[in-house]
Amino acid sequence: MDFWQLVLLGAIAGFTIFLGLPLAVLQNVSAKKKGFLNAFAIGILIFLIIDVFSHAWESASDAATNALAGKSSVNDAIFDYAAMFGGLAISLLGLVWYESRYMPKPIMPSFAENIPKKNNPSINLDSVKPGQVSNPGSSNSSSQLQQQQQLIQTRIAYKLAMMIAIGIGAHNFSEGLAIGQSYATGAIGLAIVLIVGFGSHNATEGFGIAGPLTSLVKKPNVRFLVMAGLVGGGPTFVGTIVGSLWISTIAYILFLSIAGGALIYVSMLMYNSGRRQTTNAVIMTGIFVGMCIGFITDLIVTLGGA
C-alpha cells in the first residue's frame, strides 16, 4: 500500500461520520422520541468518553511504568501526564469560557421589563413552553416571547452540535495519528484494520452530532450539517497524514484528553436539555441503547484484530 492509498482510506474512515448525520433532519417526531434520540446520542458520547480516556491513560501509564523500570526517561512520563491533564483542562475550562462568551443566554431582559416583578421577577425561556402564556396581560408579548425562545433554542442547538463535532474531531485526529503511525512503522496490516475499524466506528459518531438538532422545529441547514461532518470527520484524514510523517505520543495523548473533556462538557449540556423534553426513564433507556451500540462497534473492531 502506497502513501496515497493510505490517504484515501484515511479520508474514507473519517467521512463515514456522514452516515449518522441524516438523523438530524427527522421531522414530525414527538417530544418523547426527540428526548430518546437526544439520550441515544448522549449514550454514544459517554462511550466515546470511556474509550478516549482509556487509551490516553493506557499510553500515559505505560510511559510511567517504563520510566520506573528504567526503560525510558522520567521526563517522557511527566510530559505524557502533563499532556493528559493539560488537555483536559484546556477543553473543560475553555468550553466554560466559550459558553459564557458566545452561547445565547436563556433570559430576555427586554421582556422581563414589561412584567411586574411581584408576579414574575425573572423570565427564563427554558420554563416557557409552546402554548403557554407567561404574561396574562398581553398575548402579543407571549407570542414574541415564544418566537424569541425558539430562536435562542435553535442557536443553542447549532452551537452545541458544533461543539460536539469539535470534540469528536479531536478524538478522530488521534485515531488518524494511530493509523498514520502504524503505516510509518511498517505495520501495514494494522493500519488497514484500524482504517476499517475506525470507519465503522465513526458512522455512529454522526448520531452524536445530530442529537441536539433533532429538537429543532425546522430542518437543520444542510450546509451546517456538511460543515459539522467535515469538522468531526476531517481530522481523521488530517491525522492520518500527520501520523505517517511525524510520530508523537504526547500529541496523541493531548488530543485524546482534549476530546474527552469536550465530550464530558457537551454530554452534561445535552442531558440538561433532555430532562426538559421527556422523563428520566426515557433518557436512561436512550443512554443505555447508545452505550450498547458504542461498545458493540468497538467489540467488532477488537475482534477484527485492532
Image (cartoon, helix red, strand yellow):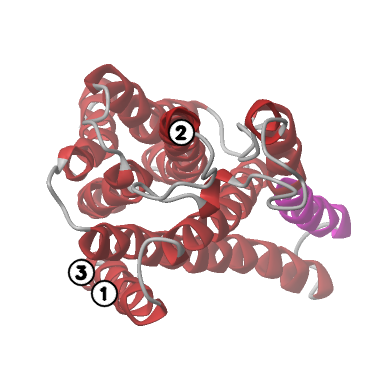
**Residue 227 at what x, y percent from top left?**
34, 22
Residue 137: quadrant of the picture: top right
Q: Which residues are magenta?
A: 74-89
Q: Is residue 159 above or below residue 274?
A: above
> Disc number at residue 289?
1
Instruction: Determine the residue located farthest toward the bottom in the rendered image.
Output: 281
Q: Is residue 295 above or below residue 193?
A: below
Label 3 Cα neighbours within 10 Å, binned few <14 / some 14-19 / many ≥20: some
- Check disc 3 and report its element: helix, strand or loop: helix
As for residue 152 lying within the magenta part, the answer is no
First in sequence: mark 1 or mark 2?
A: 2
Which one is earlier in the sequence, the residue at label 3 or at label 2? 2
Which residue is depicted at the point 35% across and 68% down?
A: 278
Place residue 19 in its image quadrant.
Answer: top left
User: What's the distance in space between the residues labelled 1 and 2, CA to CA?
Assistant: 23 Å
Tell me: residue 30, above or below residue 292.
Answer: above
Quadrant occupied by the N terminus: top left
Which disc, if any, is residue 162? 2
> Where the C terminus falls, by quadrant?
bottom left
Query: Residue at position x 32%, y 41% from top?
Result: 213
Labels 3 and 2 touching (C-beta < 8 A): no
Residue visible at 68% across and 44% down in the picture:
91
Answer left or right for 229 relative to 54: left
> Would residue 205 be seen by someone viewing this image from the given angle?
yes
Tell me if label 1 and label 2 are in contact, CB under 8 Å: no
Label annotation for residue 300:
3
- Give, as a three-letter code, the residue at label 1: Val
Q: How far across and down, in percent of the image, does residue 168 sit?
A: 45, 44
